[in-house]
Image: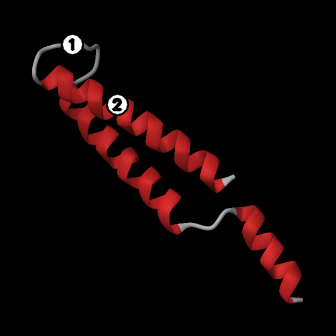
Amino acid sequence: MIKILAIIMLIGGAIALIMGVLGIFGSVALMLSPWALAILGFIFFVAGFSMLKYRKDTDEVAAQTTKNS
């Protein structure tokens, strides 16, 4: 479950970051502030990447606890 959430955050953050950067340079007209979109995209991208890299999935944690007991 954690890996699914991390992948969603990673993809959503990448899309928001790209749209924000394109909005900052004037290539795309957005309804939102391009700076806010770029900053939020960066935050979600980094959070998703770090969750994907460092967290164990809930299924793996449950399997380890039943294996150890």
- Label 1 crowd (10 A; few <14 / some 14-19 / many >=20): few
Q: Amino acid at mark 1?
A: Val
Q: How far apart in space, not on screen, are marks 1 and 2 (Cα)? A: 12 Å
Tell me what residue is drawn at x 59 percent, y 47 percent. 5
Residue 9: % across, % down? 49, 43
Closest to the observer, 18 or 40: 18
Q: Is residue 63 left or right of residue 42?
A: right
Residue 2: % across, % down: 63, 55
Q: Is residue 62 above or below residue 34?
A: below
Residue under the image location 84 percent in, 88 percent down: 68
The amino acid pointed to by label 2 is Ala
| Callout 2: SS | helix
Mark 1 or mark 2: name the one nearer the start of the chain: 2
Residue 11, labelled with which disc? none
Single out the residue that lies furthest toward the top. 29
Q: Position of residue 32 (x, y in %)?
A: 28, 20
Residue bearing mark 2: 16
Q: Nearer the viewer, residue 58 or 35?
A: 58
Q: Is residue 15 above or below residue 5?
A: above
Q: Quadrant of residue 29?
A: top left
Determine which quarter of the picture holds residue 22: top left
Quadrant the C terminus occupies: bottom right
Residue 28, labelled with which disc? Answer: 1
Q: Residue at x 62, y 67 (%)?
A: 56
Does residue 66 appear left or right of residue 22 in this picture?
right
For residue 39, side relative to residue 1 (left or right): left
